[in-house]
Each structure stands twice: as structure tokens, then as C-alpha cells.
Amino acid sequence: MLVVIPTARSVSFEYLQPLIDHGARFIVVDDSDGNVRIDHPQFKTYNWSDQDRMLGPDVIAIPRRNGACRDFGFYIAWHESDPGEIVIALDDDERVEDQDFGTQVEAVLSEARRPVATGAGTHFNVLDCYSNIEANCFVRGFPYSHRADYKTWTFGGSRRARSVSISACGGTYSMSTPSISSKGRNIATPRPSCIIHRWRSRTAR
């Protein structure tokens, strides 16, 4: 497992200990000219000078002074990951709480059979995978034009997960048993049977 962390501050080993113990490798994107120093065999740090050296004129594609600098970390992960290796991204203030979090992620992304989500329309609200969600609550990026008439999707049947490469955006500050939280306050509980996709770093170059 590769973990990409963008930061202009610092990285806490304490916050990441379960993933360190799991054997994860870390790519830290130092969004500065070298202010972030990390001395740990599982961590590699890349600052602006590294980006300039490795990308040359293409460095303009990597934003600076904002969290989107993580894109450089994904670029490194694309080059350094093993085939099928999982790549995740965390912010520098996220704490991994469950000791088996790495194992949980691998299980979610395994090729085990998954329930199939069905519903009307062309957009799926991932919050349908969770219970005790407030009415009319949608993830960031869900089109406003499709919210008024949206009907919750249902889950049934099953199929084996395919090898796919997808990305997802979610805001959470506490990485634990899959849940949705805001600054440590849990606002939803997952339905474990509703996890239907696996996230992989890539399936082919």
C-alpha cells in the first residue's frame, strides 16, 4: 500500500502508526522549498526542488500552496507502485484510528462479490451506502440539477468486483471503520454490505 500525503506543515507518525505497522509506504509531498523533514525508512519526501528536477517544464502542471499538490504524489505512486498495489491519499491532519485499517482497505478492494446498486437516473449518491443519513444530503460534486427528484438506490444480488481504476473525493478527519465524520464528529454509519467498488492504483500502464 502506498499513502500519499500533501503537507506544508508536518506529518505525525502517531496519527499514521496503524498504517506504518501494516507496512505501508508513504509519499510526502512537501508543498514548500524544503521545510518538511522526515527521517523514517518508510517515508519519502519530495519538495519543490524535487518537482522541478523531475518534471522540468512540465512542473507547471502541479499546483503549489494548496492541497492539489498531492497530484505530484500520485505521479510518483504511478511510477513506484507495484502492479495492483493500492494507493490512498490522506491529509496531514487525519488520524488513522483502527489498528487494522490497512487490512480493512484491502478487504474492501478485494475481488470478493459485491451487492449491486440499482436506481433511476444517471447519478449515484454514495451516501446511499450509509444509514442514518439526513434527508436531501448529497456528497460534494453531486449535480444540483439532479437532487430534487433523486430517489435512493437499492442494493441486491451480487457480482464479483472487476479490476477498475477510480478516484473518489470524501472529507474526513478520522480514518476508522468506514464512516463519515466531520472534525471527529460521526454523522453516519455504514451499511457494510453496500461497499461495491474496489479502488486500485492502476490495472495497466
Image: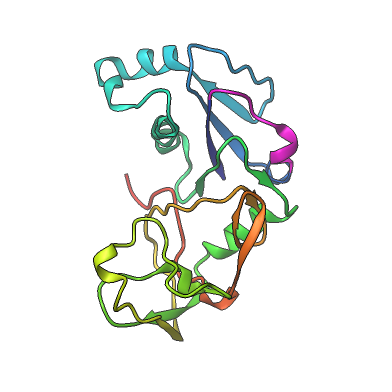
Percent x, y of residue 120? 28, 82
Residue lying at 72% horizontally and 56% vertically, measured from the top left:
100
Q: Name the one closer to the observer, 147 or 198.
A: 147
- x and y percentages locating residue 159 in the rendered image: 43, 80
Q: How is the image coloured?
A: rainbow
Would residue 63 be counted in the magenta stretch? Answer: no
Relative to 7, say whether 147 is above or below.
below
Q: Which residue appears at 37% of the width and 60% of the height?
A: 164
**Residue at x-position 46% and y-position 34%:** 80
**156 displayed left or right of 9:** left
Quarter of the image for residue 16 reads top right
User: Residue 175 location in percent, x, y?
Assistant: 64, 51
Q: Is residue 72 left or right of residue 131?
A: left
Whether residue 96 is visible here, answered yes or no, is: yes
The quadrant in which residue 138 appears is: bottom left
Q: Nearer the viewer, residue 50 or 133?
A: 133
195 in relation to 109, above or below: below
Name, please, the residue furthest toward the bottom. Answer: 157
Residue 58 in which image quadrant: top left
Q: Quadrant of the C terminus?
A: top left
Seen in the image, is 125 located left or right of residue 8?
Answer: left
> What residue span does the magenta drawing correspond to?
8-17
Task: Please tell me how many numbered marks the rendered image carries.
Answer: 0
Q: Is residue 1 left or right of residue 18?
A: left
List x then y, in percent, for residue 41: 67, 26
Quadrant in which the N terminus is drawn = top right
The answer to whether residue 157 is visible is: no
